[in-house]
Amino acid sequence: MPKILLVEDNEMNRDMLSRRLQRKGYEVVMAVDGEQAVAMAQSEAPALILMDMSLPVFDGWEATRRIKAVPGMKTLPIIALTAHAMSGDREKCVEAGCDDYDTKPIELPRLLEKMETLLNRKPA
């Protein structure tokens, strides 16, 4: 199964979502801040990143921009996870380089569908 990089600073959210993804057969590696996310995106070579947007060190928008700027990582799928469900938030995530967007609290069936769509996408 694909390796997922879960970037989440809230321990309870991280633990709950990682266990649910592992039960679905995904290999899950975790980062707790934006800086660690950028480093692990390169060292772990995940198939997909779930990126919390409110992170310490630098936020999910900045982490996404940095990851997408790395040669060979421009097509790495990133789904923004955010409690921000305001008008314009989805556009802000897409502008930063996220491929999709999901709101918290996480609805696992909806998130899994978005993940599968991106994981099955053929590179351009």
Image (cartoon, rainbow, N blue to C red):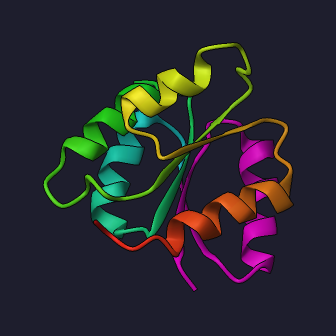
Relative to residue 96, is residue 75 depicted above or below? below
Q: Is 102 displayed left or right of 39 in the figure?
A: right
For the N terminus, give its image quadrant.
Answer: bottom right
Q: In which quarter of the image is residue 96?
A: top left
The answer to whether 48 is drawn above or below residue 80 in the figure is below
**What is the span of residues highlighted in magenta in the rendered image?**
1-30
Residue 36 visible in the picture: yes
- Residue located 71% across and 36% down the image: 10
For this view, does 116 lie left or right of residue 112? Answer: left
Q: Tell me: residue 16, above or below residue 91.
A: below
Answer left or right for 30 relative to 84: left
- Please identify the quarter of the rendering in which residue 109 is found: bottom right
Q: Which residue lies furthest to the top in this view?
A: 87
Asked if the magenta segment contains residue 3, the reply would be yes
Which residue is at a point 53% across and 79% down the rendered structure image? 2
Residue 43: x %, y % from top left: 29, 64
Which one is nearer the viewer's eye here, 42 or 107? 107
Q: Which of 99 and 3 is in front in this view?
A: 99
**Is residue 122 found inside the magenta-colored segment of the image?**
no
Question: Where's the C terminus, which quadrant?
Answer: bottom left
**Residue nearest the observer in this picture, 39 or 2:** 2
